[in-house]
Image: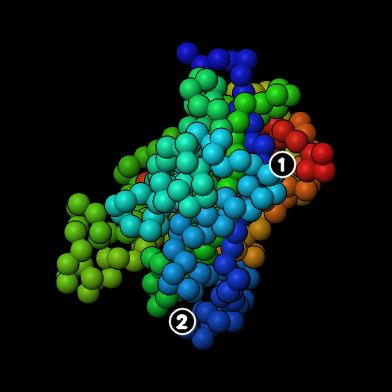
């Protein structure tokens, strides 16, 4: 049984995006697209891309973790668990999280990867919260990190304009002021895997010359279908969480949605009935960074949040996976 009196809180945030950018104008030179199309259909102006082959997902995750550690003066040896949500691990085996943990000096931690695509960070918050509330572990470093440029086909205009690279990290530990992760509504539907996937490299389609020639190592998606399910399911999940917590669109301070596409966010916002100004967005700068979008929003808006702010999260991604969560923010950055 979880202890209802104990809550897990986010007590620190860190982030990292590579220096190099890929602008819509750059993409105009690579595929048959236009800045006008990309901005009006997605809201994206640029993305950050880790061009350095020596900077895989672990590098992004380590930099985000270091940023957090340095900002809040965290002792890495006090961390119990390092959880990395990603769909672009450095390698399929070994997992990325143990390497990240070792590199940041989390010498007393265990570590594992969590694969739930764009819902990875949301699921990760739920896992971290349950561990902390159970009393089993005290300090969890949750990182959402993806080097999407490593699986994007830059000759496919339907996918290459959307995705970017980045990482965000949060520290979750027992709340001391009553604010923290409240609860969530999480779901999945495996019949959706035909609409968003990377075919080869797993046990179903091991890589060989044929899968390689077919481009099976690239991410594929049926954008329109994903769009429809994303709006439907993020809206439904958010409404469930609002009902469970007696929240109204007025009482919610911020909606932190997965940065999939500005039009998906707008349609979801309308369905929930939340005011425009409460929806936090940074998709224009980073594109869709998959597991990193939610913590990158937290990092960008950290200085705006006040202790007690009511934050509703919503995400949808490959699998399909989706959900919503309610969190009361734990601290003012200035204190
Ligand atoms: O994070 C979870 C994972 N992914 C998502 O959430 C993505 C969800 N889907 C989307 O964001 C959108 O579906 C896309 C941005 C991928 C595409 O936007 P859309 O408005 O759904 O476009 P569409 O796929 O319906 O295509 C409309 C037209 C097509 O041309 P025709 O067939 O009407 O002549 C496409 O070929 O737009 C064309 N098109 C493009 N044109 C210029 C598709 N991509 C591009 C492009 N530039 N980059």
Mark 1 or mark 2: name the one nearer the start of the chain: 2
Asked whether residue 66 appears in the rendered view, the answer is yes
Above/below status of 330 relative to 168: above
Residue in the image at 52% along x and 65% along y? 164
Q: Is 103 left or right of 206, judged from the image as shown?
A: right
Q: Is 327 left or right of 289, judged from the image as shown?
A: right
Outermost residue on the right side: it is 334
Residue in the image at 75% along x and 36% along y? 331
Above/below status of 54 relative to 74: below
Q: Looking at this view, is 63 or 184 the one in front?
A: 63
Q: Which mark is residue 31?
A: 2
Q: Which mark is residue 254?
A: 1
Q: Position of residue 194 (x, y in %)?
A: 31, 53
Residue in the image at 66% along x and 50% along y? 70
Asked if the beta carbon under badge 2 is closer than 8 A to the nearest atom of ligand 1, the reply is yes
Residue in the image at 38% along x and 58% along y? 90
| Label 1 element class | strand
Above/below status of 195 relative to 177: below
């Amino acid at each position: 049984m979880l202890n209802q009196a104990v809550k897990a809180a986010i007590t620190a945030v860190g982030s990292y995006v590579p220096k190099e950018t890929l602008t819509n104008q750059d993409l105009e030179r690579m595929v048959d697209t236009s800045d006008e199309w990309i901005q009006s259909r997605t809201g994206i102006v640029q993305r950050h891309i880790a061009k350095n082959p020596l900077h895989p997902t672990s590098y992004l995750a380590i930099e985000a973790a270091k940023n957090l550690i340095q900002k809040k003066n965290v002792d890495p040896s006090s961390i119990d668990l390092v959880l990395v949500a990603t769909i672009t691990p450095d390698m399929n085996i070994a997992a990325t999280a143990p390497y990240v943990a070792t590199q940041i000096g989390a010498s007393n931690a265990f570590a594992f990867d969590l694969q739930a695509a764009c819902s990875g960070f949301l699921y990760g918050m739920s896992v971290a919260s349950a561990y902390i509330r159970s009393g089993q572990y005290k300090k969890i470093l949750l990182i959402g990190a993806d080097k999407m440029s490593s699986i994007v086909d830059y000759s496919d205009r339907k996918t290459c304009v959307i995705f970017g690279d980045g990482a965000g990290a949060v520290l979750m530990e027992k709340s001391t002021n009553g604010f923290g992760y409240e609860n969530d509504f999480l779901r999945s539907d495996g019949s959706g895997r035909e609409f968003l996937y990377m075919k080869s490299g797993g046990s179903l389609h091991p890589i060989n010359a044929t899968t390689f020639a077919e481009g099976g190592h690239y991410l594929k998606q049926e954008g329109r279908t994903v769009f429809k399910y994303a709006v439907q399911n993020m809206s439904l999940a958010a409404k469930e969480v609002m009902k469970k917590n007696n929240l109204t669109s007025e009482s919610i301070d911020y909606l932190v949605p997965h940065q999939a596409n500005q039009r998906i966010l707008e349609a979801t916002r309308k369905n929930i009935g939340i005011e425009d100004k409460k929806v936090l967005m940074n998709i224009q700068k980073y594109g869709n960074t998959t597991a990193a979008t939610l913590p990158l929003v937290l990092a960008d808006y950290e200085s705006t949040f006040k202790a007690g702010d009511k934050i509703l999260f919503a995400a949808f991604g490959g699998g399909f996976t989706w959900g919503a969560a309610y969190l009361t923010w734990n601290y003012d950055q200035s204190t």
